[in-house]
Image (cartoon, rainbow, N blue to C red):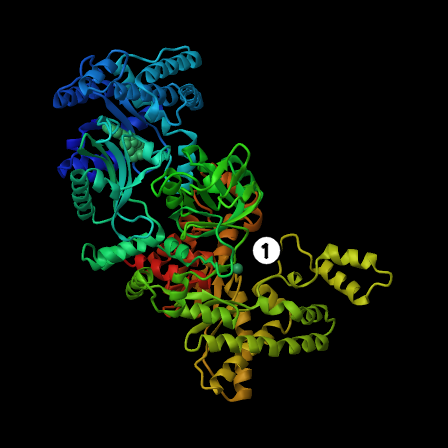
Amino acid sequence: TKYVYAFSEGSRDMADLLGGKGAGLAEMTRLGLPVPPGFTVTTEACKVYLATGEEPDELGVEVARALADLERAMGRSLGAPEDPLLVSVRSGARFSMPGMMETILDIGLNDDSVTGLAKASGQERFAWDSYRRLVQMFGRTVMGVDGDLFEQAISDHMAQRHVATDHELDTTELVKLTDDFKAIIREATGEEFPQDPADQLARAIRAVFDSWNGERAHVYRRREHIPEDLGTAVNIQAMVFGNLGGDSGTGVAFTRDPATGESGVYGDYLPDAQGEDVVSGVRDALPLTELEHLDPRAYAALGGHLRTLENHYRDLCDVEFTVERGKLWILQTRVGKRTAEAAFRIAHDLGEEGTISADEALMRVDGAELTRLMFPRFDTAGAAEPIAHGVPASPGAAVGVAVFDSAEAVRRAAAGERTVLVRRETTPDDLPGMIAAEAVLTSRGGKTSHAAVVARGMGKVCVCGAESLAVDPAAHRFTAPDGTVVTEGDTLSVDGTAGTVHLGELPLTASDVGRALQSGTSTGALTDAVLGALRHADSLRRLEVRANADTPEDAARARALGAQGIGLCRTEHMFLGERRALVEAMILADDDTAREQALAALLPLQREDFTGILEAMDGLPVTIRLLDPPLHEFLPDRTELALRIAAAEDPDPRDRALLKAVERMDEQNPMLGLRGVRLGLAVPGLTAMQVRAVAEAVTARLRAGGDPRAEIMIPLVGTVEELRLARTEVERVLAEVAEETGTPFDCPIGTMIELPRAALTADRIAEAADFFSFGTNDLTQTTWGLSRDDAEASFFPLYLDQGVFEVSPFETIDQDGVGRLVEIAAAAGRAANPDLETGVCGEHGGDPASIHFFHRVGLDYVSCSPFRIPAARLEAGRAAL
Ligand code: ADP
Ligand code: MG
Ligand code: MG
């Protein structure tokens, strides 16, 4: 195996092997962009190292050979005493993990070469600034010394010289600082800072390998579902210097605005700076447009390269660049992360410009992003002024209590509390807190700061660079310019779209996208893009999208959002509220007459419910599920009732009767008890009442000139015998009502498939069913033999942590197990009954990954909650591509 590739040997297609950064450097080299030369150690080498604890044997030789080539090309030798070549050693995995792993700059400097560098560059201060950076970075990342020790030493020197930034330390001071750094290393490790450049290089490469297993890298991968075994590549690249004075600098640029998607070059620039000074926000960067004044030629060159890259990748690209004495170098590119808003706008614009096809544009957005855009916004009408303004770095509206460190955010989130993580700036160590918090607020850094980049990647609300805030993390508080002091636990409303922070909790209102989806009319560039993507998805998709809705209002909302019917109308909510008394009477009835009376009282109420829903969904199918949950759910809590009786002087005899009934109906495992079809078969008159209510509602709608399309669905069937019995009863009542009214109508009768036995005997069941609706929530519970409510609260976090599953099977369908049953049952059902309709009505019906699966196994529709319908339409369209 070849473990080392020169940049000129690689290409964008080799990202698995070279990592994203290495592939990007190689591709830019091929395109002729000004990339400092270098080479990449492959992820394969990293994998060997991670598996065995040793670099592969050939690696040393290959690195030495590639280094010799690099030295020849540059005409300089690594760490040579005269005019030394310096290199950076940069991590770069397959998937971008911003700031999660290590990069070490200025490798090759030592006590001798620092003088050589000073001479060659004519800048002594620069040489020593670079050397102290190397000792610091190397000490921290390679030798494991606590980074705070170095920061403290810098602070001490600044205090001694009475200066506010390290920028103002002169050469003499930097020489002393470097000495102090070396002493810190010596003290902490008992070892000297290594002077041999080759040794520095080898150890830096190993440290980058090791950083794959760093804690924050693990946390990030888990969160982003990045596999644990990919390993990282390592890029060794000739250094260029942005810290050579005013005609040098370093920056980050985007081909379009990654927050809004607006076209036009966008970014940050920091003169006279090296490396990560921009991203870390230690100094405030200038907007990129300033570079146009500082150095018009470099700016023009950058603009040209950005265009080249965007045309080449046909997508938003971001680059990291450095200007060394007026000469522009590009150090990194990738297809840039973006907000949901930017994703839709960029895809739409690139489509309109003809850069990509409509199909490609659709593939560039997804349902999760669309859902995010539908989240409500703050309603600021009548609200007090914001206490702070910052950079709107990642959009959305979030409310939470202020916390000032990552651990507190994690602690409070575990207790179910919503938090806003407030920091001066974030570092990769804040990652767990950023994941736990609803929003991130910082007082430093721009749209390309760590906080902004990471929050955007996670879809978290973020306002950064709110410079007017005086954040005091040690005291757990910040002070706003108007004097407001916010301490830990105070509630904040953070608006990542406007870049504002309000004290207290602001009310919410529908977002522009939410409104446009409801009304079907666009109000701007973003809603144009969203509606356009949905139109295209609708034209492609084969899956229909229905709604889970139990009220006329929900049905109407769902229809406005594009629902093509109701896939699941639960009838149990119709048994709640003031109707509870009637339900109690039905359950308590000790003879047929009493029961019939109670049912007769429920009948008109159910009929009205159904009439309203059928009206809202006129002309579209409405699948009504007969009562599913165990009856005791409609009775009072057993303990409460017992206490009430015990406390009363003269207990209500009704209460005593109720308690008896509750005790009689108590079940160890209600989920596996008297529910679903079993209930309909066991409680006389219940099915008849519900079916009659449906039939009378249909008749009423027909008489009113409507087009009602009711379907009756029988839940929790395990064997065709159950379905046959239930179906006979349903058909009997339908015929009875038709006879009475003289208006016969067609009403498909189907069943839910939510027990493994039903799935496995689907061929038999299909003989008695007009449709199957996969109840994947219960099917997941019964297939795995676990109860969702219990499991999610107890061992799921552990399972997710240990990688038993990457995502909860209740969130995304478990294709190998539950999905297999769906596949078997759908195929067997259709074989036995070619007219059989198939759909899904569990939570999975609105989950993007699951929708792609349901498309593949050939179901007819998915059904989900109204809010998720647009995303489901989008994903069903993408699945068809
Ligand atoms: P990350 O993956 O965290 O962005 P990078 O490997 O990109 O880390 O390094 C961070 C920064 O270090 C870069 O943005 C760049 O400014 C600087 N850097 C890396 N390599 C070089 C180099 N060869 N010359 C100059 N600066 C470099
Ligand atoms: Mg980088
Ligand atoms: Mg169910």
Q: Which residue occupies the foreground of this view, 341 or 613?
A: 341
Residue 856 at x, y percent in the picture: 33, 56
Q: Quadrant of residue 516?
A: bottom left
Query: Residue at the bottom extreme?
Result: 742
Residue 640 at x, y percent in the picture: 74, 56
Residue under the point 55% across and 70% down: 726
Q: Which residue occupies the foreground of this view, 715 or 208?
A: 208
Look at mark 1 in the image and give the residue it sits on. Answer: 671
Along the horizontal axis of the image, is 661 left or right of 26?
right
Mark 1, other Cα within 10 Å: few <14 / some 14–19 / many ≥20: some
Residue type highlighted by circle 1: Met
Q: Quadrant of residue 335?
A: top left
Q: Which residue occupies the foreground of this view, 280 or 162?
A: 162
Say which quadrant the C terminus sits in: bottom left
Q: Quadrant of ligand 1?
A: top left
Can residue 41 be seen at all in this image of the molecule? no
Q: Which residue occupies the foreground of this view, 43 or 36?
A: 36
Disc 1, SS: helix
Residue 434 at x, y percent in the picture: 46, 40
Along the horizontal axis of the image, is 276 left or right of 639?
left
Can residue 550 be seen at all in this image of the molecule? yes
Say which quadrant the N terminus sits in: top left
Residue 722 at x, y percent in the picture: 54, 66
Pointer 1 residue Cβ closer than 8 Å to ligand 3: no
